[in-house]
Image (cartoon, rainbow, N blue to C red):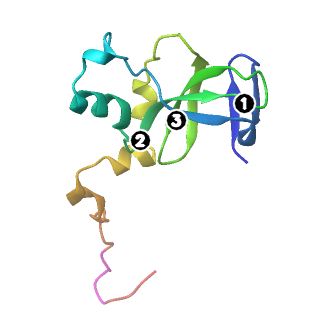
Amino acid sequence: MLLIRCPYCEEERPELEFRNAGEAHIARPADLAAESDEDFAQFFFVRSNPKGIIFERWRHLHGCARFFNAARDTVTDKFIVTYKAGEPKPELIQAANDGGPAAWANRPPAELNAKPRVPRRRRPPGGETR
């Protein structure tokens, strides 16, 4: 079972106590009524959905019932850090470049299926093996 750390309760709890509330750090337009239909649709419906690290809002529904933000790797489903709502987005350069599965998946397509070259061991003269 996936354990998620609530930054308000300061403990890890089972994922069943939480609900995802979408992408975090979305800037709301100042005058929503003045937005065109296309701009409103872009703001309201379109999200980034990257492969790798994403910042999300979560709610501890069956606990303190508060919203908080989390950085999660969408490839491994690992929560990297959770932090209180209203706090700035943390810098995750080290976590993003740790060489894990997400870093591998974000390589160019030509490199994904390339097999690493392993030097072959040469046999001694006469074909004998040790």
Q: What predominant SS class does the magenta segment belong to?
A: loop
The residue at the point 71 percent across, 16 percent down is 8
Amino acid type, label 2: Gly
Q: Compared with residue 60, is residue 84 higher up or lower down, i.e. above or below? A: above
Label 3 neighbour load within 10 Å: few <14, some 14-19, many 20+: some
Segment colored magenta: 122-126
Task: Determine which residue is flagged by label 2.
Answer: 52
Task: Determine which residue is flagged by label 3.
Answer: 72
Percent from the top left, x then y, of residue 42?
28, 33
**Which sits earlier in the primary sequence, circle 3 or circle 1?**
1
Determine whether, in the image, residue 55 is placed left or right of residue 123: right
Question: Which element type, helix, strand or loop, lies under badge 3?
Answer: strand
Foreground of the two, 98 or 2? 2
Foreground of the two, 29 or 111? 29
Label 2 neighbour load within 10 Å: few <14, some 14-19, many 20+: some
Q: Nearer the viewer, mark 1 or mark 2?
A: 1
Question: Which element type, helix, strand or loop, lies under badge 2?
Answer: loop
Determine whether, in the image, residue 107 is placed left or right of residue 86: left
Amino acid type, label 1: Leu
The residues bearing labels 3 and 1 have C-alpha atoms spaced at a distance of 19 Å
Task: Determine which residue is flagged by label 1.
Answer: 61
Amino acid type, label 3: Arg
